[in-house]
Image (cartoon, rainbow, N blue to C red):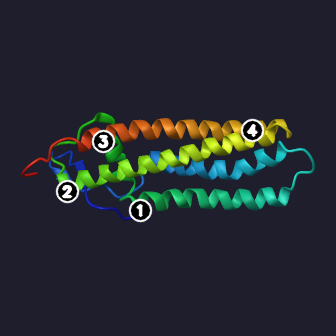
């Protein structure tokens, strides 16, 4: 995975150094969790539905999702400069400050992209809430499994909306800081 250079501090010299471009342990666990969720989701969905269970469809969908979901995540990381760049940007937004050794030309575009991504997540969150409402309407005449799907969509929607709001607010505060000279 390739990404743009830089936002970490070299531990030996204390100087600004490029981001490490590899996926860290947390990133690998996220990929494993996505693969497992992709493999298990079709099973949960179809087993909770009344009638015969289409095992071939479950296996094919499970295998496809177990490959596609982690692949999309890695693609998303690489499109945004790599996992290390995203971790550094999240840390800046959460802490509300950027280390002084990181040049404005590096951190400002990343934080601006973070704001744009937070706005996009807001749209996704509302889409999830809409799907939850639609699925709740369908669940009124369906099964308990349909209510479970509605709850999952609602939880995804609310979580996405809340996280996007926090991320957007923190990033906008960082961008309001004056431009630093000479870094």
Camera-side mark, 2 or 3: 3
User: Which mark sits nearer the N-terminus, 4 or 3?
Assistant: 4
The residue located at (69%, 52%) in the rendering is 39
User: Which mark sits nearer the N-terminus, 3 or 1?
Assistant: 1
Q: Is mark 1 on a helix, strand or loop?
A: helix
User: Which mark sits nearer the N-terminus, 2 or 1?
Assistant: 1
Per the image, the residue denoted by label 2 is 105
- Residue 81 vertical position relative to residue 160 in the rendered view, above or below: below
Per the image, the residue denoted by label 4 is 136
Q: Is mark 4 on a helix, strand or loop?
A: helix
Residue 10: image location, x then y, percent = 20, 49
Q: Do callouts 3 and 1 mark residues in contact (Cβ within 8 Å)?
A: no
Seen as rendered, the residue at the extreme left is 182
Residue 95: image location, x then y, percent = 29, 34
Q: Do callouts 2 and 3 mark residues in contact (Cβ within 8 Å)?
A: no
User: Which mark sits nearer the N-terminus, 1 or 4?
Assistant: 1
Camera-side mark, 3 or 1: 3
Per the image, the residue denoted by label 3 is 172
Q: Do callouts 2 and 4 mark residues in contact (Cβ within 8 Å)?
A: no
Residue 49: image location, x then y, percent = 85, 44
User: Which mark sits nearer the N-terminus, 2 or 3?
Assistant: 2
Q: What element carries label 3?
A: helix
Along the viewing direction, whichever of 19 and 147 lies nearer the viewer: 147
From mark 1 to mark 4, how far is it between C-alphas? 35 Å
Q: Which mark is residue 79?
A: 1
> Circle 2: is it few (<14), some (14-19), or many (20+) Cα within 10 Å?
few
- Residue 129 vertical position relative to residue 17 in the rendered view, above or below: above
- Residue 42 vertical position relative to residue 1 in the rendered view, above or below: above
Along the viewing direction, whichever of 151 and 4 lies nearer the viewer: 151
Q: Is mark 2 on a helix, strand or loop?
A: helix
């Amino acid at each position: 995975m390739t990404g743009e250079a830089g936002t970490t501090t070299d531990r030996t010299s204390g100087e600004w150094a490029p981001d490490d471009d590899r996926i860290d342990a947390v990133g690998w666990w996220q990929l494993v969790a996505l693969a497992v969720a992709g493999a298990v989701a079709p099973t949960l969905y179809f087993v909770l539905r009344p009638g015969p269970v289409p095992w071939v469809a479950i296996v094919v969908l499970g295998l496809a999702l177990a490959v596609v979901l982690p692949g999309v995540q890695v693609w998303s990381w690489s499109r945004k400069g790599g996992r290390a760049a995203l971790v550094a940007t999240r840390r800046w937004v959460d802490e509300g400050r950027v280390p002084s050794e990181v040049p404005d030309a590096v951190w400002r575009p990343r934080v601006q992209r973070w704001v744009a991504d937070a706005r996009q997540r807001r749209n996704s969150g509302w889409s999830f809430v809409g799907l939850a409402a639609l699925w709740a309407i369908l669940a009124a005449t369906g099964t308990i499994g349909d209510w479970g799907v509605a709850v999952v969509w609602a939880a995804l929607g609310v979580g996405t909306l809340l996280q996007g709001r926090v991320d957007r607010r923190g990033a906008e505060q960082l961008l309001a800081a004056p431009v630093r000279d000479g870094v």
